[in-house]
Amino acid sequence: MTGFVGHMKNCIKQNRSQLNSKNAKFRDNVDLGFIERNEMQFKEVSEEKLKSIKEDIRIKAEMEQKRILLISLSIFLVLIIACLYFL
């Protein structure tokens, strides 16, 4: 039993020693230099083009919702018919 308790205390100490605050590369918020900090650049689009893009997205989303609804209803009907047939 003593070995098990000692082992657990050792594991806890090891986990505490691996905390980011004690790790040298994370101390004092040191920048490691492997992350480039580039600002994002977006395309400029006219208002008319933006409205048409948004409308296209809305139409596609509505069609997708209708398609999913039809598929789920057809699966539900098939399951109801199968249940009635086997009962």
Image: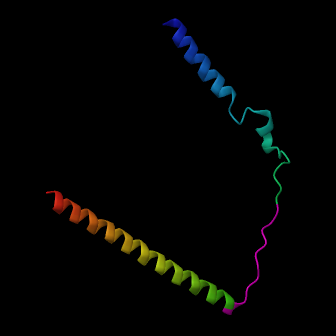
Q: Which residues are magenta?
A: 38-48
In terms of image quadrants, where is residue 77?
bottom left
Is the C terminus in the top left, top right, bottom left or bottom right quadrant?
bottom left
Question: Farthest residue in the left direction?
Answer: 87
- Side (left or right) of 81 relative to 26: left
Q: Magenta span has 41?
A: yes
- Side (left or right) of 33 relative to 62: right
Residue 33 lies, in percent from the top left, at 86, 48
Residue 30 lies, in percent from the top left, at 82, 43
Residue 36 lies, in percent from the top left, at 83, 56
User: In this view of the protein, which residue sits in the foreground, 28 or 2?
Assistant: 2
Q: Residue at x 60, y 20 (%)?
A: 11
User: In this view of the protein, which residue sits in the foreground, 78 or 11?
Assistant: 78
- Side (left or right) of 5 relative to 45: left
User: In this view of the protein, which residue sits in the foreground, 43 or 39?
Assistant: 43
Q: Is residue 64 above or below residue 11?
A: below
- Side (left or right) of 23 relative to 15: right
In terms of image quadrants, where is residue 50?
bottom right
User: In this view of the protein, which residue sits in the foreground, 32 or 87?
Assistant: 87
Q: Is residue 70 above or below residue 53?
A: above
Residue 39 lies, in percent from the top left, at 80, 66
Q: Residue at x 72, y 89 (%)?
A: 46
Q: Is residue 44 above or below residue 33?
A: below
Q: Residue at x 22, y 61 (%)?
A: 82
